[in-house]
């Protein structure tokens, strides 16, 4: 039987949890998981409910019916809300350049059914990953970028996004900056991964810079992409400790491993509708 997710964002008032729970009970739904959070800084309330029907009503009439019925509650509390079919696989588009560790990790998780998505296409500005991708039977779109063709290539990219009905774009070490216009169009639908040294060690070879500086912690950050470079809402971060015994190659290897794990977590939480954007930050019900 299908199961569903409800996400809510509104000002905190007494009775929200009770009203939502009673609504689902009266409409013959069973709550599987419920999480909520109140942001005391601005009195905003966030809630995620995972539920399933205990008869076939919603199976027959679809999710639109429950949305209409819920409108009375949403108006009462002035809610921003969304219902999602949690059993429906989302379509993700992966974009990659020359570093393939994140791509390989995602493809392995997908192939072993640990990542419940469809991957209809992978876009790259290089051909380095073509053979690996085609081994998985996935279409590889080679899209070289230059100063002269960047605008046209982004139009072609947007056509691909529409063609495959892409729900989420993953920048798996894609080393090109997307235009502010495209980022605004796809707000909340692009996830990027990079090292966690920023604002230190900007530019190329950050692990080399960190190694020379003698840092003691390295890590990775996954965040949503906005029209401000590397300023998007952070979804997940993780770190690993290093010391004087570690070589430069150890730094790079550990950093890539952390990037793999952090990016995969971010993708999973996004497709499971566990993330609610809260201005410049995120609420993550993990």
Image (spheres, rainbow, N blue to C red):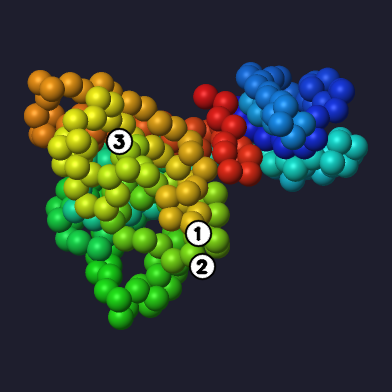
Cα separation, mark 1 vs mark 3, equals 22 Å
Q: Is residue 240 above or below residue 148?
A: above
Quarter-of-image position of residue 27: top right
Mark 2 vs 3, N-terminal side: 2
Residue 35 horizontal side relative to residue 96, left or right: right
Cα separation, mark 2 vs mark 3, equals 27 Å
Quarter-of-image position of residue 207: top left
- Residue 187 pos. (x, y %): 55, 54
Crowd rating for badge 3 (residues with CA inside 10 Å; few <14, some 14–19, many 20+): many
- Residue 93 pos. (x, y %): 39, 52
Tag 2 near tag 3, CB within 8 Å = no
Q: Secondary structure at mark 2?
A: helix
Q: Which residue is mark 3?
A: 259
Residue 159 horizontal side relative to residue 55, left or right: left
Residue 207 horizontal side relative to residue 64, left or right: left
Report whether residue 255 is seen: yes
Crowd rating for badge 1 (residues with CA inside 10 Å; few <14, some 14–19, many 20+): some
Q: Quadrant of the N terminus?
A: top right
Cα separation, mark 2 vs mark 1, equals 7 Å
Q: Which residue is mark 1?
A: 227
At 49% from the left edge and 33% from the top edge, which residue is drawn? 269
Q: Which mark is nearer the camera, 1 or 3?
A: 1
Crowd rating for badge 2 (residues with CA inside 10 Å; few <14, some 14–19, many 20+): few
- Residue 163 pos. (x, y %): 45, 64
Tag 2 near tag 1, CB within 8 Å = yes
Q: Secondary structure at mark 3?
A: helix
- Residue 153 pos. (x, y %): 35, 73
Mark 1 vs 3, N-terminal side: 1
At 59% from the left edge and 32% from the top edge, which residue is drawn? 283
Q: Is residue 119 above or below residue 27?
A: below
Residue 273 horizontal side relative to residue 238, left or right: right
Mark 2 vs 1, N-terminal side: 2
């Amino acid at each position: 039987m299908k199961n569903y997710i409800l996400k809510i964002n509104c000002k905190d008032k007494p009775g929200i949890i009770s009203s939502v729970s009673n609504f689902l009970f009266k409409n013959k739904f069973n709550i599987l998981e419920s999480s909520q959070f109140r942001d005391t800084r601005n009195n905003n309330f966030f809630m995620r409910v995972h539920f399933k029907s205990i008869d076939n009503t919603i199976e027959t009439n679809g999710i639109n019916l429950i949305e209409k019925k819920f409108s009375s509650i949403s108006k009462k509390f002035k809610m921003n809300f969304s219902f999602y079919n949690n059993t429906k696989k989302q379509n993700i588009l992966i974009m990659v350049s020359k570093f393939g560790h994140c791509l390989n990790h995602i493809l392995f998780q997908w192939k072993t059914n640990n990542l419940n998505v469809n991957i209809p296409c992978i876009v790259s500005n290089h051909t380095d990953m073509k053979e690996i991708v085609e081994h998985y039977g996935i279409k590889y779109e080679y899209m070289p970028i230059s100063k002269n063709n960047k605008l046209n290539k982004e139009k072609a990219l947007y056509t691909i996004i529409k063609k495959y009905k892409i729900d989420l774009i993953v920048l798996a070490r894609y080393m090109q900056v997307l235009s502010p216009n495209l980022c605004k169009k796809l707000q909340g639908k692009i996830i990027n991964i990079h090292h966690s040294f920023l604002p230190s060690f900007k530019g190329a070879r950050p692990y080399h810079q960190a190694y020379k500086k003698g840092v003691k912690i390295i890590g990775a950050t996954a965040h949503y992409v906005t029209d401000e470079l590397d300023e998007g809402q952070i979804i997940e971060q993780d770190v690993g400790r290093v010391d004087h015994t570690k070589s430069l190659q150890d730094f790079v290897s550990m950093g890539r491993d952390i990037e793999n794990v952090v990016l995969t977590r971010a993708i999973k939480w996004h497709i499971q509708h566990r993330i609610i954007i809260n201005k410049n930050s995120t609420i993550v019900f993990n």
